[in-house]
Amino acid sequence: MATDQIPTLSELAQRSTTRREFLLKSSVLGTLAPFALTACDIDKAEQKAGASSGSKSVTPPTAGPATAVRNADSKLDTGGHANVHQSTAAVGKSENLAFRRFDPALPAVSPERTVKIQFTAQEVPIRISDDTVISAWTFDGDIPGPIVHVRQGDTVDFTLVNHGAIPHSMDFHTAQIDPKVAFRSANPGQPISYTFKAKYPGAFLYHCGTSPVLMHIGSGMVGAIIVDPSSPLPPAKEFVLVQSEYYLGAATAGVMPFDYTKMLATLPDYVVFNGRPTQYMTAPLKVRVGDRVRFYVVNAGPTHPCNFHVVGEQFDTVYLGAPPGFPLRGVQTFGVAPGGGMVFEMLADVPGEFVFVNHGFGHGQKGAIGILNVDGA
Amino acid sequence: MATDQIPTLSELAQRSTTRREFLLKSSVLGTLAPFALTACDIDKAEQKAGASSGSKSVTPPTAGPATAVRNADSKLDTGGHANVHQSTAAVGKSENLAFRRFDPALPAVSPERTVKIQFTAQEVPIRISDDTVISAWTFDGDIPGPIVHVRQGDTVDFTLVNHGAIPHSMDFHTAQIDPKVAFRSANPGQPISYTFKAKYPGAFLYHCGTSPVLMHIGSGMVGAIIVDPSSPLPPAKEFVLVQSEYYLGAATAGVMPFDYTKMLATLPDYVVFNGRPTQYMTAPLKVRVGDRVRFYVVNAGPTHPCNFHVVGEQFDTVYLGAPPGFPLRGVQTFGVAPGGGMVFEMLADVPGEFVFVNHGFGHGQKGAIGILNVDGA
Amino acid sequence: MATDQIPTLSELAQRSTTRREFLLKSSVLGTLAPFALTACDIDKAEQKAGASSGSKSVTPPTAGPATAVRNADSKLDTGGHANVHQSTAAVGKSENLAFRRFDPALPAVSPERTVKIQFTAQEVPIRISDDTVISAWTFDGDIPGPIVHVRQGDTVDFTLVNHGAIPHSMDFHTAQIDPKVAFRSANPGQPISYTFKAKYPGAFLYHCGTSPVLMHIGSGMVGAIIVDPSSPLPPAKEFVLVQSEYYLGAATAGVMPFDYTKMLATLPDYVVFNGRPTQYMTAPLKVRVGDRVRFYVVNAGPTHPCNFHVVGEQFDTVYLGAPPGFPLRGVQTFGVAPGGGMVFEMLADVPGEFVFVNHGFGHGQKGAIGILNVDGA
C-alpha cells in the first residue's frame, strides 16, 4: 500500500537528534487554554509511545509550570480555539538533514478492495531547501503525508498512531463517517482506528483535524487520497500535487517553527507543491509526447486558492466534481479552493519544458512552481 | 411572509438606550465628501421617521460643523467613494442586550404568487457573543436580514423604510431592474419601493448598495433570498447560511463599531455564518438519518470566498448556477464567491455530529463553523 | 488586425521626455541576482533598439556598478526570482500626458485565417486618472495591451519587438507550444517570433512571462485574446474586461512606479478594468434594449479573483470553460481566477443604468466598477 512506498524522515530525525531534544518546544503560547510542554511531558509522551530517549542534558525552555496536554474533544477538534502559537522546533543538528524530493507520481492502486493503512503522527524537522529546515507536524514524517490511492467503493481500514507530543487526529475528506468518533484526537502514544468506504471518485484532502485545525493543517499534517472512478478514466501519466502555505517564525538552532499568528495574518512565506518550494524546477516531472497527463491537485491551504495553470498548454478536461461528470474543456486556469481538490488533464502532444504554477502570483511565486518535461524523442 | 417570522432587535435596542443616544456616531471620517452626524442631524432624522426620542442629555461627539447627510445618487451608490470610516456606535447599556441565535431554517414559501415584503433599515447594536456587542447597520434589526423565500416566477413587492440616520438602499440580486431607480438610496425617514419577478432559482444575496457599498455590506446590511425552481427540488431539510466578515474598531461604551479602514485591509476579526461566530456549535442544526440536507450558502463577503465543507461528509449535489442545471457530484469543498450563492446538498445517511466550516481556515477559523447533528434514533 | 486599431502612448511619452530620461530607474534592488540599470545600460539598450536619445544631462541614479542586464532564461522566466523591486519611473513632464479611455468593445475578427500580430514591449508612463500617472511596463504602450480576436483553429503569427530597457517576453494562454522556446525573453532591441493555433474558444490572458513574472504582470504587461468557437455564439454586443491590480510606490516627478514588495503583500492600491479605475463610470458601455451582452472577463491578477457581477441583472449564461460547453444559468456572481478568463452573458431586456463590479468589495471597490447603459429608446 501507499504507506510502504513513501519513506519517512523519522530515521533521519532520530539519527541527528534525540527525540527528547527534538520535541522540546521553542515557543508555546496560549490564549484560551494555555499549555506548555516541558521535558517532563515529552518524556511521558515518549514512555507511552515506547520511543527511546537519549541524552537528558538539554535545558528545558523557560516555560511556565507544566500543565497537562489538553486532549481536545471532537467538537473543538475542528474549532476556533487557538491554544498553540508556534510549532515544535527541533534543537540541534538540523544541518545534517538531507533534502529529499517528494515523488509526485500517483502510486499504483492496491489490488485489494479492502486497503489497510497505518500512519504515524510525528513532529519532525524537514529540510525543504538548501538553506531552510522547518519544524513540521506530519503524517509519517513528511509534508505532505503518503499519497493514498484507492478505487471507488474500496474499504479503507485506517489506523493513526500518535508518536507526537500533543494530540493529533485524521480527517479523510473521502469518508462519510461520524467525525466526532472517527476524527477524534489521539493522545500521544495512542492509536485511533476507523474504517470507511470511498464513495466518490476524485482528488481529496486528508488532514489533522485537532484544534486549532488552522495550526495542524498549517504545520503540515496534510495529504492526498486519490479515488479512481469505478469505470476507469483514460490511461494517463498521473501526478499528485498538494499545495500548502508555510508561515514560519525565526529559526531556533537552524529550524524554523510554524507561526500561528502569521497563519491568521494570511501572508505566507512559501506556497509549495508537495512540501518544498520549486522542487520540480530542478527535478521536473517527465512524460513523453502523446501521453495524457492527469494532475490531481489538492489544496491543503490553509487559506488561499490554488489557481492551477500549465504554461504553454491548456487543459482539455477539468473535473470540478467527481469525474467523469461535467468535464470543462479548454481551460487555462482554474481555482481549487482550500480544502478542495480537482482533476486537471491535458494531452502532451507538444514536446518541451512546460512550467506549472499557481497563477495567483502574489502567493504562487513563493514556490508553487515546477516543470513538466514532455520528451519528444 | 418571511418578515413576520423573524423578530427584530429594535425593541431591545429601544429598551436599553434611546434612539438618539444610539445613533450618535463614535467616529466618522471623510475623504471625498466628509460629513458628521450630530445630535441635531439625528433629531431631524428621527422627526422624519416619526421615531420617539428620549433623553436629550447626551453630549454630541466632538465633530465638526453639522453638514447635510449626503444623499448618494445611484451612480455612486455602488461606487468607490469612501466617506464613512467607522459605523455608528451605540452609547450606553449594551450589557443588557441579549444574545439571540439566528434561526437558519429556510422558512416556508409563501402560498401567494405576489409576495409583499417590507423591511426597515436600522442602525442597532447586536450582541454576537457573550463578550461582544457590535454597532450594526441592518435590515430589520439583525445580521443577516430576514430570510426571504419565494418561487421562480413570483412577483416580489418590496418596500424599504429607512429608520436609520444615513441613507440606505436595497439591492436584490434576484431582481432584473434598473438599479439607478430601484436601488436608489432612501433618505432617513423615507421609503423606497419596487417590484420585481424572481426569474432564476437559487440562493441569492440582497444588500444595501449605498456608497460606500463596502461599508454598508461590511456593517451588516445583507441577507438571503432563496428562489425555488418551478419544478421543485427533492424534499429536504433546508438551511440558509449567510457568511459575513466583521472588521471591528475599539469599543465605545461596550459597543464595537465597524471599521472601514480594516475592511480595506481585508483581514477580518470574525467570519461568521448568520451573524454570530460559532453560534451553531452550541446550538446545532438538527436533522434525522435519511434526511436530505440542503444548504443555501450565500456569501455576503465583502471580500473573501466561503469555501464550504462538511466534515465527515461529501456533497452529492452542488449547483454552481441555477438548480437543477449541471449538478456537481462528490464534492468535498467549493468556494462561493463574495456576492454569490450556491446550493449544496448531502444525504444524511450516517448519524453523528458533523461540523460545517469555511475550509479556508486562516479566515474561516474566526467563527465560520457550526454543527449539523444527524440523529440516528 | 487588432494592433492597428489600438493607438499607443509611445508618442506621448517621447514628446514629453526623452527615452533616456524616461527609462532611468528610480529604484532597483536585487535579492538573488541584483542588477542596476544605469544611463550607460539604457544607452546601449537604446542603441540596440535604434531608439533616438535626446538630452544626456540627466544624472544617473546612485546605483552600484553597472552590471549586464540579466537575460533570464526560460526556466526562470516564469520563476520565483525577485531581482527587480520597483518598475521604471519616468522623469519629467507627466502632467502633459492625457488620459485616454480604453475601448472595451471586442474588435471585429480578422477575415484571415492566419493572423499576423506584432507588438512592442515598452516601458511608458500612463495617466490612469486626473491625478495619477503610473510607470507602466506594457505591450504597445497601454494597459492592457491590444485586444486580439481570432477564431478557433486560426493560426496566429506573432512577433514581439522589445523596445524596453530590460528583457521581456510573451506568454499567450491560447498557445500549445514549448514555452522554453516560444516564451523566452527578448533582450532590449531584439524581437522574438512564434506561431500557434488557437485550439480552444474562450477568453484568454496573455502576459509577459519574464522573471519575476509577478513584477511583469503586476507592472501591466497583460492583455486579452478572445477566440470565437468554430460554431459562432449567438450575436451579441461584446465587451472585453481585463482586471488588473496596481501596487504603487511613491511618485518620482509625478509618476508612480510599481512596487514589487507591495505586490508580495497582496494589498493593491487599485483594482481596475482595462487599466484605469472607474473609467466606465464617466464613459459607460452602451447597448440597446433587446441586445444580448457578452462580457469576456480576463483576470490578469496578479493575485485576487475577479468576482464579476452586474447590479440589477443576472447572467443567463456563464461559460467556466470553452463555450458552448456546460453553460451555467441564472448566475449572480462568479469568481474568475487570476490567470483565467470566463464568458458572461446577459439579455439586456430592461433599460437602465447597470453597474458592473468586482463584488469582492475590499479589493473591487478600489476601481473595478463601471456602468452598462441599456438604452430603451
Image (cartoon, coloured by chain):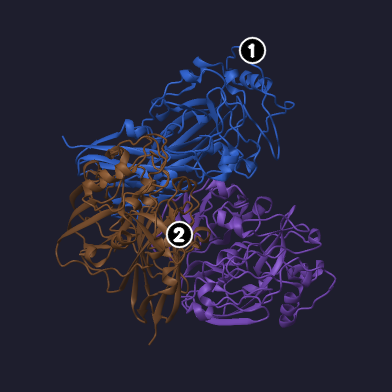
Chain colours: A blue, B purple, C brown
Residue A52 position, x and y percent, is: 58, 14
Comparing B140 with A73, the one in front is: B140
- What x and y, as percent, mark residue C352? 44, 80
Q: Which residue is mark 1?
A: A57
Q: In this rendering, would B248 be left or right of C339?
A: right
The amino acid type, in three-letter code, at marker 2 is Val
Q: Residue furthest front?
A: C57
What label sits on residue C271 in the rendered view?
A: 2
Query: Closest to the observer: A224 or C237?
Result: C237
Q: Is residue C202 left or right of residue B324?
A: left
From what the image shows, is residue A21 above or below residue C114? above
Instruction: Report whether residue C193 is seen.
Output: yes
The residue located at (49%, 38%) in the rendering is: A269
- Residue that protrudes farthest toward the bottom in the picture: C377
Asked whether B313 or C247 is in front, the reply is: C247
| Mark 2 nearby-residue class (10 Å; few <14, some 14–19, many ≥20) | many
Percent position (x, y) of residue B131? 75, 52
Q: Is residue B307 left or right of residue B116?
A: left
Q: Residue at x 30, y 74 (%)?
A: C236
Asked whether the viewer can see residue B113, the reply is no
Q: Chain of mark 2?
A: C
| Residue A220: x %, y % from top left | 51, 34
Residue mark closest to the camera, 2 vs 1: 2
- The quarter in which the N terminus of chain B is drawn is bottom right
Residue at 46% across, 72% down: C355
Q: Secondary structure at mark 1?
A: loop
Residue B237 lies in what quarter of the image? bottom right
Count of numbered labels shown in the rendering: 2
Label 1 amino acid? Ser
> What chain letter is assigned to the residue under label 1?
A
